[in-house]
Image (tube, helix red, strand yellow):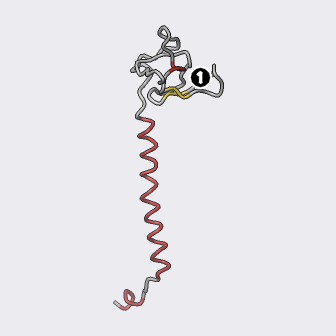
Amino acid sequence: MDTLNSKKVTRRSFLKGAALLASIAVVPAAITSKDASAAAKATQAAMQYQDHPKGKLECSNCIQYIPGKTAKAKGTCKVVEGAISPQGYCLAYAPKA
């Protein structure tokens, strides 16, 4: 019993331990949220993506499209995974206002 009573916890060691526990809790949450956002995108096949437009409807005119470095470079999409052609089309097409 004397060894339990002889160990005193200082405020500094308590705060260090609390900070360590808090950081351990944050890391899995950060990893999970990153994986969840990637999993939220649909596959190109599921959205019937094609590299050519459907009439005047093309990805470069869609609100979901995120352009590449140049006007002709492939970009990305907020809804569909993978590289997306600016002249492409899919079921998620929504015209820019």
Q: Residues within 10 Å of mark 1 (few under 14, many from 20)?
A: some
What x and y, as percent, mark residue 54?
A: 47, 10
Residue at x 45%, y 26% (from the top left corner): 80
User: Which three-letter amino acid code belongs to the residue tagged 1?
Assistant: Lys
Asked where in the image residue 85 lies, by quadrant, the reply is top right
Report the residue marked by disc 1: 74
Furthest-right residue in view?
70
Question: In front here: 25 or 72?
Answer: 72
Taking the spot 43% from the left edge, 52% from the top edge, the residue there is 28
Q: Farthest residue to the top: give it.
A: 55
In the rendered image, residue 75, in percent from the top left (x then y), is placed at 57, 26
Name the residue at 61% across, 27% down.
68
Count of marks placed on residues: 1
Residue 12: x percent and y percent? Answer: 50, 79
**Residue at x 54% of width, y 24% of height:** 83
Q: On the rendered structure, is 82 left or right of 33? A: right
Task: Tell me the quarter of the image containing the N terminus.
Answer: bottom left
In this view, the residue farthest toward the front is 97
Residue 21 sits above or below residue 5 on the image: above
Element type at mark 1: loop
Q: Considering depth in this image, is 67 or 3 the residue closer to the camera?
A: 67
